[in-house]
Amino acid sequence: MKPFYVVLVVIYCLISIALVIVALMQEGKGGGLSAFTGSSDTYWSKNKGRSVEGKLVLVTRILATLFIVLSIILALKVWPHA
């Protein structure tokens, strides 16, 4: 059971590093002054889900879900006697 735990910890570390990198690659969500001028309804903002930015958001959600699930699994494995 120990090698399985080590593999999970290594995967957990890789997911956490990938999550940080993908989150830093994304653009800011703040609208800035465009929220006041009403220019936020552009072609780019309507089709953002199909762009690279949309794919980064999807990858971030998947990595965050895996991170949370592995956190729970590892926490249950570490504290089974509590």
Image (tube, rainbow, N blue to C red):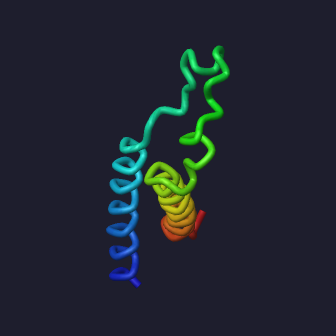
Does 73 sit above or below residue 44? below
Q: Decide if residue 79 is in sight here.
A: no
Q: Nearer the viewer, residue 81 or 55?
A: 55
Instruction: Give the residue at x 36% y 56%.
Output: 18
Does 62 sit above or below residue 53? below
Instruction: Give the residue at x 32% y 68%.
Output: 10
On the rendered structure, is 10 left or right of 57? left
x and y percent of residue 35 in the render? 63, 20
x and y percent of residue 6 in the render? 33, 74
On the rendered structure, is 27 left or right of 62? left
Instruction: Give the residue at x 58% y 49%.
Output: 47
Q: How many marks?
A: 0
Residue at the limit of the structure toward the front, as seen here: 43
Does 81 sit above or below residue 57? below
x and y percent of residue 72 in the render? 57, 63
In the picture, the quarter occupied by the N terminus is bottom left
Residue at the limit of the structure toward the bottom, as seen here: 1
- The image quadrant of residue 42 is top right
Q: Nearer the viewer, residue 9 or 81?
A: 9
In the picture, the quarter occupied by the C terminus is bottom right
Q: Nearer the viewer, residue 81 or 54?
A: 54
x and y percent of residue 68 in the render? 55, 59
Q: Decide if residue 11 is in sight here.
A: yes
Q: Nearer the viewer, residue 36 or 39?
A: 39
